[in-house]
Image (cartoon, rainbow, N blue to C red):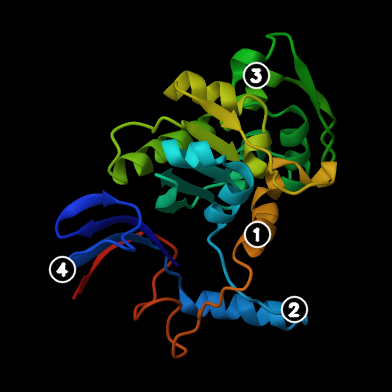
Amino acid sequence: MCFPIDYHVDGMSGIRNPVGLHGNLVEVEAHVVMGDSVILKNTIKAIEANKTTVKSMVLHSLASAEATLTGDEKEMGVVLVDIGGGTTDLAIYRHGQPWYTSVIPIGGSQLTKDLSVSLKTPLYMTEEMKVKWGCVFPEMVASDDEVVIPSFQGQPKHALSRKILCEPLEARMMEIIKLIVLKVRQSGLREFPAGGLVLTGGGSEITGLAELVRKTLGGQVRIAHPGGIAGLPAQLRKPAFSASVGLLLWGIKHQGETRSYMNGGRSIVGSKSWRWGLGRKKAAAVR
């Protein structure tokens, strides 16, 4: 996948669309997203085994952006963060186009594992407690607020301060926030763009996330719910479904386009096989 960032005509930059201009040298700076061909082939094969045809593939964060970001946010510049179960996907938009993408290998499931270790409870039980009582901003929790830890393997149920339950969740989320800041700096930006930070994905539904991010980073922060489709059922308007809804919108937007994702059976785009990531390339055309 390739998204033009900027065109240069005879050394003049800042051109959005060079069509119709005269010049001797045209250059383009583009954001290139590439993927591991083996992983993607196996994914396609598994889907096709269920009698479903794959017409195109979309990076998770870009799909989420379709369902959550406004045109103004993309134009001003915005950081989208989709916190999933196993990963946190990041996309930076500038001037209406994807400018940087990255994947952080930590997600909401890591919060569950941390809490499971802290409480010494099985994952399924811990996940329920995280969803019901979890909070990553302990300042929102009353000092006398308690939760009941269910009985397990002969251990009787017992009461626990909710603040204690929230401590490992806050610690892990702070790590994710620091990694987000690191990725933004690695992109070349010194600070967050004018559109601020948009959070989505199932992991963003945990109580206190927006408050924690605002206190840590400042600036504009919002939790985004998917939209853009009329009559979308209420259960699908949760942040956890942003990427799924975004896939539908992406398909509608790019309907009729044909893309080759299997080039000679070796790579997805281009001549190299990369994991999902960022490639910023310049290409020149000389008349």
Q: CA distance from mark 2 to mark 4?
A: 47 Å
Looking at numbered disc 2 in the image, what kind of residue is underneath it?
Thr
* Closer-to-camera residue (237/175): 237
> In the rendered view, does 254 fall on the left or right side of 287?
right
In primary-sequence order, the first of circles 1 and 2 is 2
Q: As displayed, is residue 247 above or below residue 148?
A: below
Which numbered dot is residue 52?
2
In primary-sequence order, the first of circles 3 and 4 is 4
Q: CA distance from mark 2 to mark 3?
A: 47 Å
Where's residue 131, x and y in %?
74, 35
Quarter in which the C terminus is drawn: bottom left
* Residue on which disc 3 sits: 163
Q: CA distance from mark 1 to mark 2?
A: 15 Å
Where's residue 240, x and y in %?
69, 46
* Residue on which disc 1 sits: 247
Is any part of residue 113 visible from this angle?
no
Looking at numbered disc 3 in the image, what kind of residue is underneath it?
Lys
Q: As displayed, is residue 100 above or below residue 151?
A: below
* Residue on which disc 4 sits: 24
